Amino acid sequence: MSAIVAETERLRLREWDEERWAEFLRVTNTPAVMQWLGGVGDAAQMAAARARLDTYMADHGFTFWAVERRADDAILGFCGLKRANAPGAEPLHGEVEVGWRLREDAWGQGYAKEAAIASLDLAFDRFGAERVIAFTAAGNAPSQGLMKRLGMRRLPEHDFEDTRFPGDAAPNPQVTFAITAAEWRAQR
Ligand SMILES: CC(C)(COP(=O)(O)OP(=O)(O)OC[C@H]1O[C@@H](n2cnc3c(N)ncnc32)[C@H](O)[C@@H]1OP(=O)(O)O)[C@@H](O)C(=O)NCCC(=O)NCCS
């Protein structure tokens, strides 16, 4: 069994194993979920994504972890932390970044916020972050809404074009949000 990283009222964050990763792909590598993430990925892209998540964990002790529902052990998606490395956001590289991706039938129930709160608690309390940032496409209203509900603030001076996504249909520009440790503790 893969290690449990954190537990919330309804969810677990856990490390990846083959079974959970296969289920994650089945439920999240869909047009709706991937709308703002470059579209559905092929097998090579998804294998590269898994390798990146494993590298983040090995290098820093955190990654975008599996989100599992405690009631039925269903894999809902991922949520967690990485070191910012988006091509185009170089001034912020290395800062702790929070991110999320849930299956479509798990949207609108507060699961993403619950997993994100656990991730931000880990960032500030266990990993000593002074600030946590988040990126999303300017058009991704659900993700920006979550950032605002978490108390994160827009940093318009750090908006950027993500060069992984060339072309007219690219989910650019990317907008940047952030919250400091002091701001997080003041609202917890
Ligand atoms: C971005 C994403 C994670 C947001 O998920 P979400 O479910 O909208 O976010 P939350 O967990 O904060 O849920 C909020 C909604 O749940 C509702 N809700 C229901 N029960 C709730 C509860 N117990 N607690 C909190 N909110 C609850 C809220 O009212 C809100 O609904 P509304 O949007 O209709 O006002 C989701 O849209 C997603 O996975 N998208 C695809 C992948 C993606 O784009 N990822 C981001 C890339 S940067």
Image (cartoon, rainbow, N blue to C red):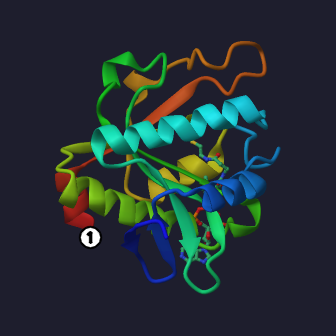
Residue 31 sits in quarter: top right
Residue 9 sits in quarter: bottom left
Residue 86 at x, y = what percent?
47, 25
Residue 177 at x, y = what percent?
41, 40
Ligand 1 closer than 8 Å to label 1 CB: no
Left or right: where 185 falls relative to 50: left
Residue extending furthest toward the right? 31
Residue situated in front as seen by the camera: 32 or 127:
127
Query: Which quarter is ligand 1 in?
Result: bottom right
Residue 128 at x, y = what percent?
17, 50
Q: Is residue 87 visible?
A: yes
Left or right: where 102 falls relative to 30: left
Left or right: where 159 falls relative to 126: right
Residue at figure coordinates x 42%, y 37% from the top left: 55
Quadrant where the image shows the C terminus: bottom left
Residue at figure coordinates x 64%, y 67% from the top left: 75
Number of numbered markers: 1
Residue situated in front as seen by the camera: 66 or 81:
66
Left or right: where 171 falls relative to 150: right
Residue at figure coordinates x 25%, y 58% from the top left: 184
Q: Secondary structure at mark 1?
A: loop
Is 63 situated above or below 110?
A: above
Three-letter code, disc 1: Arg
Q: Is residue 133 visible?
A: no
Q: Which residue is mark 1?
A: 188
Residue 168 at x, y = what percent?
77, 15
